[in-house]
Image (cartoon, rainbow, N blue to C red):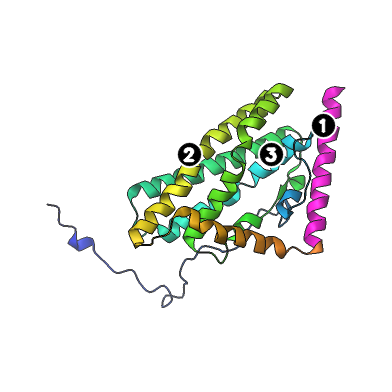
Amino acid sequence: MLDLSPYNFVLPNVAELGGSEFAISRKGARDRRFNLNRFAWPDNLGCSFSPSVGLQLPVRQSVHNLNELYVAEMVGACLIDLAADPEPEFLTDAARWCFDEICHCRIEFTRLTEWNFPVSEMSFGTFPYDSGANASSLTRLAMIFYFENAYIHTKPERAKIFGDWGDKVSSHDMDFDWADERIHTQFGTGWPKYFFEKQGDPRRPTDLRPEAEACVKKTIATAIETDRAKTQVAFEMMMKRARLLALKFAG
């Protein structure tokens, strides 16, 4: 058997060397070239309007998928927090989850760019990630699951709507997104269940839902008038750009 004992060593105390321990940020950060808003789209704030009307649907879908960056951030944070003693599959599943969400983000960034949206007009927020700032790692996993599971049924519906409109690219993107999200919902229930059982905790993944929803509602409750105004301005700016684009193609 290979003797690895010479390679066993104790990591130095980083504080003694003038450094600090690594820690995942509990607040999201974004590239300032984007149109930065805490809440990227009015429905983040509970505003009631139908996203399925005309141009609102594809623009809204693109903005939401662009903002799925938060899922990669949240899963990455959970990966760091929970990586000490899981099954190896957790590491690969979490890495796959991060990769998928960055793909979704990149797809819609490319889509908006092709639609001639300048980066400075793309509404980018931190609301979902910030909602988990003070939550446990398992609650954060539950938050991702309930965000995604709440809208998964809309994916095939929207893929069909886009297809009926003749927007084959958006239809393809939505179908691609739906396939990934179906896998992610399995991660979102399976891994909390695994960690509960490992810790001897009798709770089920569904028991995390009230706390996850409370975190989201608490963040929405902190929105001030400035937040709401900025979100509305971002919405109106993007819809104005979309209408100009539609007129250009119609002409």
Magenta residues, start to end: 226-251
> Of the residues tagged 1 and 3, which is closer to the observer?
3
Element under disc 3: helix
Percent from the top left, x then y, of residue 186?
Answer: 46, 43
In reply to whether residue 234 is colored magenta, the answer given is: yes
Which residue has dot 2 on it? 183
Residue depicted at 78% across the width and 64% down the height: 224
Is disc 3 surrounded by few (<14), some (14 to 19) or many (20+) residues within 10 Å? many
Q: Amino acid at mark 3?
A: Ser
- Mark drawn on residue 245: 1
Is disc 1 surrounded by few (<14), some (14 to 19) or many (20+) residues within 10 Å? some
Q: Quadrant of the C terminus?
A: top right
Which residue has dot 3 on it? 62
| Residue 33 visible in the displayed image | no
Percent from the top left, x then y, of residue 175?
Answer: 59, 30
Apparent side of residue 226 relative to residue 177 in the rendered image (left or right): right
Label pair 3/2, CB-CB below 8 angstroms: no
Q: Farthest residue toward the left?
A: 1
